[in-house]
Image (spheres, grey):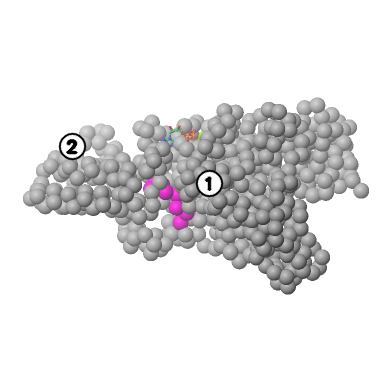
Amino acid sequence: MEVVGSVKRVAGPVVHATGLKANMYDLVLVGKEGLMSEVIGIAGERHIIQVYEDTSGVKPGEPVKETGGPLVAQLGPGILTTIYDGIQRPLPLLAEKSGDFVSRGLFVDGIDHKKKWEFIPVVKKGDIVKPGQSLGLVQEQLLIKHKIMVPPRHKGGTVKEIYSGNFTVDETVCELEDGSKLTMLQKWPIRVPRPVNKKLPPSIPLRSGQRVIDGFFPLAKGGTAAIPGGFGTGKTVMQQTLSKFAEVDVVIFVGCGERGNEMADLLHEFPELIDPKTGRPLMERSIVYANTSNMPVAAREASVYTGITTAEYYRDMGYDTMLTADSTSRWAEAMRELASRLEEMPGEEGFPAYLSARLADFYERSGRVQTLGGEEGSVSIIGAVSPPGGDFTEPVTQNTLRITKVFWGLDTRLTQRRHFPSINWLESYSLYEQDLEPWFTENVDADWVKNKRRAMAILQENAELEEIVMLVGSDALPEEQQLTLEVARMIINYWLAQSAFHPVDSTATFKKQFDLLASLLKYRDYAFDALAKGVPIDTIKSTPSKDALAKIKLEEDYVPVLQNVLAQMDAEFKAMK
Ligand code: ADP
Ligand code: MG
């Protein structure tokens, strides 16, 4: 029998109701319009409910209906390419059904239940199948074969019948001896992590194509990173660049915009991004969750969970997935708003005391894993943080940094100098460095680690020297130190700086990153040698081959060009005696 309770009190997105039997996090429908809502507290007779839609007009005495379960994501072919709101309602469909504004009480399926997909079985009658195991494949998009799996909580069994052909997600594709009928649709509660066999160590880098990241502060496959930065420091550009170039199969972009136009930009820009792997729209292997400021705060709070659930689902097929959230500050603000409606004791700056636990639970869903089906997959999470006034001491930034293993701190001073990416190379860090060094040494170059340390030491010394230069000017420095300043300038401008918009330089292979840095260090060694032999510093600094090093990064086929420049450099320094 359907349980119906009644509204007692309405406080913005939070409703109190009595007469319900629902559990925590169950989905309930509030009011005459049946607004989608979630139970977030139970206090005696009272259920405390957050409503995903605008509650204006809802009055005490209106009904609250139970649905018998939690808010779930619908998982199956057709998720890719879709732009959703925070509770997995496809935005284009919502707009179609309700005009420009999302009307209330509108239930829309997360995926198309009418569309037929060609299912190609990979098991046969008599096979024993386990949870997570693949039953068959659907070519969902050019690069993505969608594995139709036995759901994680299903017990599996012996295949009695397996079909092939075109099916909707609701039609049976496999029957088991025990009578269970499996379809291409899974439903999963968004707040519960999907199970895996085991977590694997973060020992493989997630190539981003960005030199300052891969070279200095690398992310591991299945790792977590935070990008804090004030307004205009490049958070959004960085996340879009990573979406395009990071070596992942599936991209999940969760946009939590504060100003309406930020989201409008996202909805306009993301579908325009071209996938460098295919030359076709990046959307073909992406899922976008868009929250605008006029969407209810509870849906914004839910969006990161909906997003991470879909990331885990594709991971379970054996894919590398990456979720970027822009920005998690807006998500934390949604939590703060809900907490204040719940009249909870506020913590630091009004954020709820559980802010840090929620952030931790979210980032905890990352990881490189062995899936239930025995494959290797990963979920990497990159969260932008937009601290008010660019002040990193505020609670969201601080709590995030305690959890994530990589910190790419965006620096307003670098932005002002138009140095991009504006990742501060002195303050940022990656706690995966040691886990990843063996991989780089084995797979790119034995000198990867040594060169990186040398470059970082030069930049460190540069920072110290710059302070002196500010006081006394560079001419007062000994010539060795003047040369160090020059080499640091080259590392900063020729190597760390990388335009997100240049057709070639927007991404670089590990090998190119390495070769470029090695050539700068080679110049350094020649230069110090020459200086020791008494060559005047001006002669060293005006070596023509040095300036040629500036342009190598812009060359697609850089190897022969670099070889020429290095040969020229060799000749020039030999001639200097
Ligand atoms: P935020 O999201 O932090 O407010 P944006 O990502 O919108 O900032 O970046 C602001 C501007 O900075 C961009 O419009 C672009 O002009 C410039 N920018 C940021 N990152 C890069 C980059 N890697 N290469 C070139 N320009 C960049
Ligand atoms: Mg932005």
Picture coordinates of residue 246, whole percent (x, y): 47, 49
Amino acid carrying mark 2 in the image: Ala
Residue 506, picture quadrant: top left
- 225 sits to left or right of 552: right
- Where disc 2 sits, the SS reads helix
**Residue at the limit of the structure toward the right, as seen here:** 1
Does residue 567 show up?
A: yes
Marks counted in the figure total 2
How many residues crowd mark 1 within 10 Å: few (<14), some (14–19), many (20+)? many
Q: Does the magenta stretch include residue 208?
A: yes
Please tell me which residue lies in front, 305 or 483: 305
Label at residue 318: none
- 575 sits to left or right of 344: left
Residue at position x 73%, y 47% in the image: 113
CA gap between label 1 and label 2 equals 44 Å
Amino acid carrying mark 1 in the image: Ile
Q: Mark 2 points at which residue?
A: 476
Please tell me which residue lies in front, 282 or 60: 282
Picture coordinates of residue 251, whole percent (x, y): 55, 47
Residue at position x 84%, y 44% in the image: 66
- Where disc 1 sits, the SS reads strand
Residue 119 sits above or below residue 568 on the image: below
Asked if labels 2 and 1 touch by Cβ distance under 8 angstroms, the answer is: no
- Segment colored magenta: 205-212
User: Which one is in front in this view, the residue at disc 1 or the one at disc 2?
Assistant: 1
Residue at position x 51%, y 44% in the image: 280
Secondary structure mainly formed by the magenta segment: loop
Decide which of tag 1 and tag 2 comes sooner along the chain: 1
Residue at position x 82%, y 46% in the image: 67
Q: Mark 1 points at which residue?
A: 382
Picture coordinates of residue 420, whole percent (x, y): 39, 38
